[in-house]
Amino acid sequence: MSMPALRGKRILLTGGSGFLGSYVLKKLQEKGVKEIFVPRSTDYDLVKISNVKKLLKDSKPEIIIHLAAVVGGIGANRDSPGRFFYDNLMMGVQLMEEAVKRGVEKFVAIGTICAYPKMTPVPFKEENLWNGYPEETNAPYGLAKKMLLVQSQAYRQQYGFNSIFLLPVNLYGPGDNFDPKTSHVIPALIRKCVEAAARKQKSITLWGTGRATREFLYVDDCAEAITLATEFYNKPEPVNIGAGFEISIKDLAKKVASLCGFEGMIEWDGTKPDGQPRRCLDTSRAFTEFGFKATTSFDEGLKKTVDWYKKTISGKANK
């Protein structure tokens, strides 16, 4: 059975003012949802149980979409593994526990591709999720989010709680985090190449060997997948959310450099980690279960992201 239409539901959207959350908020509004509660981290620190209880009392949700997370690239994960583990674990576990107590109809937990084992066969299938330990630099974050899958399935079994678990691949798009200390690979590359082009640098140095592969999903496509799953998916099995392709970091760097107008050399620092060797998802379950298929081509999405950065962030900095 599918959920009734989202219209008329009271939805709590944690992380709704963040990168992905802002797109999910827009999708929900387009579907006619009027009552969407978006908490600010300054008002509700979800690591603290008292704030979780206050949030649910204030928002009275029928559906919770839990996007709030502490995230970052390889460097941030390596520098703050304890914080990435504790904060992500406590936010999700406590929120789901209180949701059960308050009779929330549905909980949508957002996991991460970092939960997959380091040497997962490509393309990653959901049934491979428990076949090994995650890549070391991302493991604390990946495992903290993975526990929400365990919790979802346990609470469904014991309490009949309708909680689903989605596994988005690496996201990118306008509005991403371009802070060099915490950004993921695409925004970090865009910033580096735009700044290098402006300075007429002869070369840039990037982490790793460039041989690792990644899959990327345009953020608006991911938001569409989340809203579709919220409306139509009600099963215990986790679901991959991706575009179903992979590109090497070396080829990605060339694409970004070209779009940003950087014509210098790209050098690689092999003393820095590559992260997981390959990432590419099998996305067939999402299509079968709730009809999701990514529609934004990588070249199109990448150009939109670079154009947004140049106009919105780089343009302001140069004024």
Image (spheres, rainbow, N blue to C red):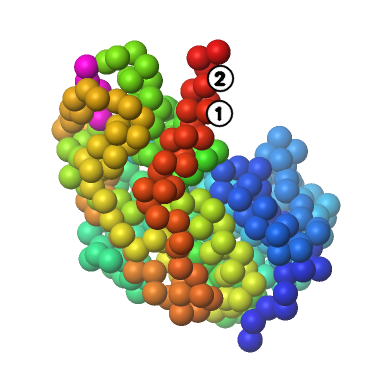
Alpha carbon separation for disc pair 2 and 1: 6 Å
In reply to whether residue 286 is colored magenta, the answer given is no
Would you call the spot at circle 1 few (<14 residues within 10 Å), some (14-19), or many (20 or more)? few
Q: Amino acid at mark 2?
A: Lys
In the image, what residue occupies the spot 34% across and 69% down?
A: 282
Q: Amino acid at mark 1?
A: Thr
Return the x and y of residue 159 as percentages of the image width and height.
65, 78
Residue 20 can be seen, yes or no: yes
Residue density around tag 2, few if under 14, some if 14–19, many if 20 or more, within 10 Å: few
- For the residues bearing labels 2 and 1, Cβ distance under 8 angstroms: yes
Q: Residue at x 54, y 53 (%)?
A: 220
Residue under label 1, please give it: 312
* Residue 203 magenta-highlighted: yes
Who is closer to the viewer here, 73 or 199? 199
Q: Position of residue 120 (x, y in %)?
A: 25, 63
**Predominant SS along the magenta part:** strand
The magenta stretch is 202-206
Nearest the camera: 118 or 30? 30
Q: Residue at left 55%, top 28%?
A: 312
Give the numbered dot on residue 316: 2
Does 210 sit left or right of 3 as displayed?
A: left
Q: Secondary structure at mark 1?
A: helix
